[in-house]
Amino acid sequence: MSEAGRPLGFWSAAALVAGSMIGSGAFLLPSSLAPYGRASLIGWALTLCGALLLAATFARLSARWPHSGGPYVYARAAFGDSAGFVVAWSYWISIWCANAAIAIAFAGSLGALFPAAIASPARAAGCALAALWACSAINLAGLREAGRVQLLTTALKLLPLLLFAAAALWFAGDARPQAPFNPSGLPLPQVAHATAALALWALLGLEAATVPAGAVRDAPRTVPRATLLGTLVAGVATVLACTAVLDAVPASTLQNSSAPMADAARALWGPTAGTLLALTAAVSCFGALNGWVLLSAQLPLAAARDGLFPALFARVDAHGTPQAGVLLSSALASALVLANYSRSLVQVFTFAILLSTAATLLPYVAGSLAWLLRGERGRTVAALALLYSLYALAGIGAQALLWGTALIVAGLPLHWWRRRRRVVTRQ
């Protein structure tokens, strides 16, 4: 693809990173962290440092291998086709699981505006699916259109989020008595481990600009800069906002809230502020969902062009859109929503984010290893990123790890079949 034909520039790439990171995590994660109170800041500190280490590692990797596919490309270049397939399959699973979680978060935010929309589990699932397929339709219209929507929604949510965080941190201290630092009663190392895994969900997407690198103008320079800037901006904004919510709303209320940031604004400044924050949260989730739907098609497109995924994923329409990737990924995300719709929004959200995070950490481990073994400079950063990824993986929990492992293993027969088919074709 010529430079003139690459639709994504620096700001679109940076918006893809920040917009993919600032989504459901910033607006719904406080409910999952509520049992740990301010002790969750320990997990946040570890996670933000780990995310920046990973961002620096992916920035170097993208400069060396500026091709579409992101973590998959780096694993394949460093370790061969089999490792490349496992990472691509794992990362693709993480993306459509993330899409399910973000769609659920959108439904929760919409419910704060229109409570009747999520009055029953079936209605909540319907709202989530409507958002998911609306974003799918935008992406089917073309990569350029998806990039424009991403830039617009990132701008619409970043400034309100920062303003909310600053104002809430200022006022929350006087809004209610200071809560216990660690209401869970668990040892702080255990709290740090559990909250680091949950908090990582809010910072997933730091590698987003590396996935469609083939469609980014001057990718060797643009992608690394967009990755670092997007990660820093999104990370700081998210940590501040989540901490403000934990200060403003009692943990007992927060644990069952489907729109915790809106509830915090309502508690501090009244119903109008709550409505505005719920609207911002809905825009944020929609923008993040749009970005992740884009990635859900670009990743299998890159793997299919290398012969590791079925050729169906490599077909593009007149707009350059890999329709099969968009449609199949959204169908799988829809199935995850429907399979769990009878549970509460917070329960489904927590399960989906842990499953997505577990599947994402394998590509993070592989990317860190790729630079550690094949990179020329910055190996210390890659080693620390690797240690953080392994630490976070250990904190995911047995259920999510087992589900993630089962989904990855389910893809191995496809790889063996395609590998055998290539051998037979060569003969």
Image: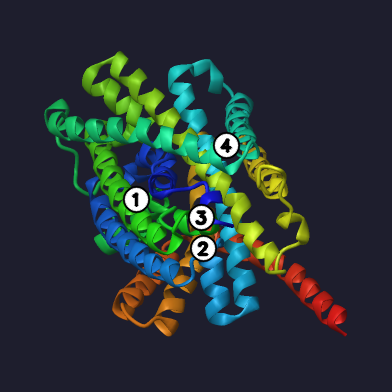
Quickly name the residue at label 1: 230
The image quarter in which residue 99 lies: top right
| Residue on which disc 4 sits | 343
Quickly name the residue at label 3.
3
Mark 1 or mark 4, which is nearer the start of the sequence? 1
Q: Position of residue 408 (x, y in %)?
A: 64, 65
Residues 15 and 296: in front is 15
Disc 2 residue type (three-letter): Gly
Secondary structure under tag 1 reads helix
In this picture, is 23 found above or below 55? above
Instruction: State the CA–CA distance, disc 4 to disc 3.
Output: 48 Å
Of the image marks 4 and 3, the number of the one nearer the N terminus = 3
Q: Is residue 329 above or below residue 137?
A: below
Of labels 2 and 4, the one closer to you: 2
Q: CA distance from mark 2 to mark 3?
A: 19 Å
Within 10 Å of the Cα at label 1, are there few (<14), some (14-19), or many (20+) other Cα atoms? many
How far across and how far down the image is residue 49, in percent? 27, 61
Q: Kindly state the secondary structure of the residue where label 2 is placed.
A: loop
Q: Which residue is mark 2?
A: 70
Q: Amino acid at mark 4?
A: Arg
222 or 171: which is nearer to us?
Answer: 222
- 3D distance between C-alphas at marks 1 and 2: 16 Å
Q: Quadrant of residue 140?
A: top right
Mark 2, Cα crowd under 10 Å, few <14 / some 14-19 / many 20+, is many
Badge 1 amino acid: Gly
